[in-house]
Image (spheres, grey):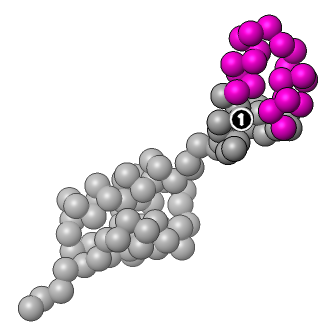
Amino acid sequence: MSVPSRRELVRHLLDKGLSERRSLRLAGISLSSFRYQPATDRNAVLKAQIIALAQRHRRYGTGMIYLKLRQQGMQVNHKRVDRLYAEACLQIRRWK
């Protein structure tokens, strides 16, 4: 049984009136796993801006996109821009 399904089972048992500790013990899940909140993606906004700049300026590579982000006032590392650029599968189109 996966952890998300166990969480759902614990919620169901809590609704039925069982205590949290007993519900967790019956489901075989720890308290920290039950209360775990996944971290938000820190790079989501930056990735969206990189994609928008790459679509607006098709000839820009990572260096120019990095400079444009810095001009907009963002404090961002060039290695982070390189990594997100590659993850988004963005490339400069080659001449035929």
For residue 65, above or below residue 71 = below
| Residue 64 in sight | no
Q: Quadrant of the N terminus?
A: top right
Residue 65 rendering spot, x and y as whole percentages: 36, 67
> Which residue is rendered at x = 37% and y = 53% of the image?
49
Residue 2 rendering spot, x and y as whole percentages: 67, 45
For residue 36, above or below residue 76 = above
Q: Nearer the viewer, residue 44 or 80?
A: 44
Q: Which residue is mark 1?
A: 6
> Which residue is rendered at x = 27% and y = 64% of the image?
54
Q: Secondary structure at mark 1?
A: helix
Residue segment shown in magenta = 9-28
Residue 47 rendering spot, x and y as whole percentages: 42, 56
Left or right: where 45 falls relative to 27:
left
Q: Nearer the viewer, residue 10 or 61?
A: 10
Q: Nearer the viewer, residue 28 or 96?
A: 28
Q: Is residue 11 magenta?
A: yes
Give the amino acid type for the residue marked by disc 1 in the picture.
Answer: Arg
